[in-house]
Amino acid sequence: MTEVIAHVADRTAPAPLEHEAGRTRPPVLRRVVGMAVRIVAALVFGLPLLFMVISSFKPDTQIFADLGGIQAFLPVGALSLDNYTGVFERVPFATFLFNSILISVLTVGLGIIVNSMAAFALARLRFRGQKLALGIILATLIVPFEVMALPLLWEVNLLPNVDSLGFYQGWLDTYQVQIVPFIANAFSIFLFYQYFDSIPKELDEAATVDGAGWFRIYRSIVMPLAGPAVATVAILMFLPAWNQYLWPLMVTQSEAVRPVMVGIDYFKQLNVSWGQIMAYASIITVPILILFIAFQRSFVNSIASSGVKG
Amino acid sequence: MWTHNAGNEAELAAIEAIVDAFNESQEEYTVKVQAFPQDSYNQSVVAAASSKSLPCILDIDGPNVPNWAWAGYLAPLEGIEDLVADYLPSTVGTYEDQIYSYGYYDVALTMVSRESYLNDNGIRIPTVEQPWTVDEFNAALETLKATGQFEYPADFATSFTGEWWPYAYSPLLQSFGGDLINRDDYRSADGVLNGPEAIEWATWFRSLVTNGYIPLKSGADPAADFINGKSAILYNGTWTATATRDAFDDVVFLPSIDAGNGPKIGGGSWQWGMSATCEDQEGALAYLKFAAADEWVAKVAGDTQNIPTTESAAAEVEGYGPDGENNIFRTYSEEFALVRPPTPGYPFIATTFQTAAQDILNGADPQQTLDQAVADIDANQESNNYFE
């Protein structure tokens, strides 16, 4: 820490000259405190992830032996890939991963189309009850999913289905039961609505004069301008789709359609395999983290420009 | 068929072996296994039951059998009585005098320690015939604490959640003379959960914390802490045997304490039953009868290192023969096991007891806390018309 402070102090030496030149820089102490706060925050959020990854290479007993000290975050002791081997032996990981990717991608893709269309209708078209419809959609935001889970289960269990053997009733244990209920999303509609509402209406009028219909205006004018909103909705729909846990527990019965998050329960037997849990958690978390870090700037920009702020 | 064994390779493979043998033994029925992870299995079953999509055959955690039978999830297993006559009573699930399930094995609670810890400190090693009394146990903990080797000489796995609390701690209450509900008619907990014996249990239970004998909240894996030398006595289940034996050559598995009414341990593990909505109950019953044979009891119990439910199967399982190192666990089950109250109200009783026990351990007034627990349990019993 001393080195960090000294380093920061060295860099701030010419500050008075810059200040005299009219450029404002915060005082040294304030910058040091700011940096220290950021480092502490980075440690608070980063250390659990580091612990997860490091522990995934340690045997269970060592994980607990190391808990009392800094060793918990260091790659020391009997490191091995045994936990990773165990994960792949215990869980059909490739199937789960494929399922999660398929479910998440289809939910996001279809969600962007459906929600943007709904928002377009609410923001650009004029019809009776428009505001009421928007109000009702927004009101659904306050209903937690857990409240709707059981009625939704009954509903999907009554829907018609078809497979190689013919028609039957019920969507349980299918991909569509994990996708379709989550395509329409009130928050996504609201985000698109907000964004579409800020696009000048004159564009619609000009397009109408040129003979364009509503679908053409939606497809060729509004959507190409809504890149940041699309990116934001994609992110905000992808994360819950990837992290789905309760719903797949209720509706999946075979491993063929089960997503990755449910897989973590495979390691919670009477003797919990902590090392394997850490390995599994690393495998399913780190790729998403890398993806986020790689596209961090785009994510932040899109969220900032679409008006979603924490 | 649904099982809770996803991720539990040994048990799943054993169950699949039985299913394969059944499918090959006849051509009329085919059983197909679908495995769910244990941690979320009950949620999956309840969700399926509410949408009437339960499978024909499913496994059930023992204490849930009466509730699931009462709720109409399960059908009685007609004609299975003779096949399970030799089973440990704790492995047969009954409700209103009918058999609804059976299990291949049981597990037992035990005090895991090391001979060296006890001998070096002059602590008597308890036996089935002469278990530790409460005073002896307290004295042993005081002695171990005085060595300075352990911050907390015992670990009662208080970090575990859910069913562990009634499974592990209600037997201690029962050893003191209390219980979760009056077993004469299963209508009220008054007098048994808040009587003088229960208060004595609660006061002692809290004293384990205030005396510094056990941590208020254990680590996430108490067995790993025991192996790492953080505790001298681990109150846990027989599933810790393999890991602790691998770690120490002088590990001992001691009987639970006798608080006046003999040592008590929880009984009943996973069992197999048939759903009430099964469209082919004859086929399901054919499988369940086929699978109840000793051969399969030995297969499942042996592969999972659990206590075989029949004596003849035990003789076939390594470690459970007359001189086997695991035979002591079967003795504990035979001698001390008490099933959790076989009433449909059990799930509510279990969560109420867990809340009360946690409050007591945290320092709540025992009488007040247990009176409230009794009031809650009795209200639930009454509002469900005593599940009649």
Image (cartoon, grey):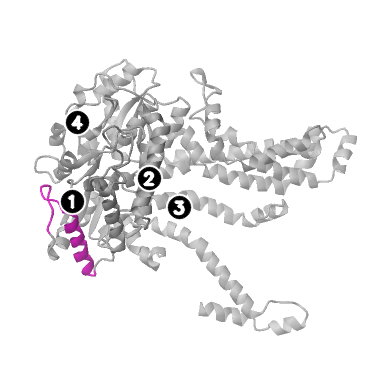
Residue B135, image x, y percentages: 18, 58
Mark found first going from the N terminus, 1 or 2: 1
Q: Amino acid at mark 1?
A: Phe
Label 2 sits on a secondary structure element that is helix
Q: Dot 3 falls on which chain?
A: A
Element carrying mark 4: loop
Q: Single out the residue that lies furthest toward the right.
A: A209
Say how many tags the image has.
4
What SS does tag 1 mark? strand
Marks 1/2 same chain: yes
Which residue was labeled with disc 3?
Answer: A282
Q: CA distance from mark 3 to mark 2?
A: 42 Å
Q: Position of residue A149 (x, y in %)?
A: 53, 35
In the rendered structure, the answer to whether residue A19 lies left or right of residue B33 reads: right
Residue corresponding to mark 2: B373
Q: Left or right: where does residue B320 sit relative to residue B151? A: left
Q: Nearer the viewer, residue B137 or B382?
A: B382
Q: Tell me if mark 1 has few (under 14), some (14-19) or many (20+) residues whose alpha carbon lies within 10 angstroms of its own.
A: many
- Amino acid of disc 2: Ala
Badge 3 crowding class, 10 Å Cα cut-off, few under 14, some 14 to 19, many 20 or more, is many
Q: CA distance from mark 3 to mark 1?
A: 36 Å
Magenta region, residue range: B124-148
Question: What is the C-alpha distance between the residues marked 4 and 1?
Answer: 23 Å
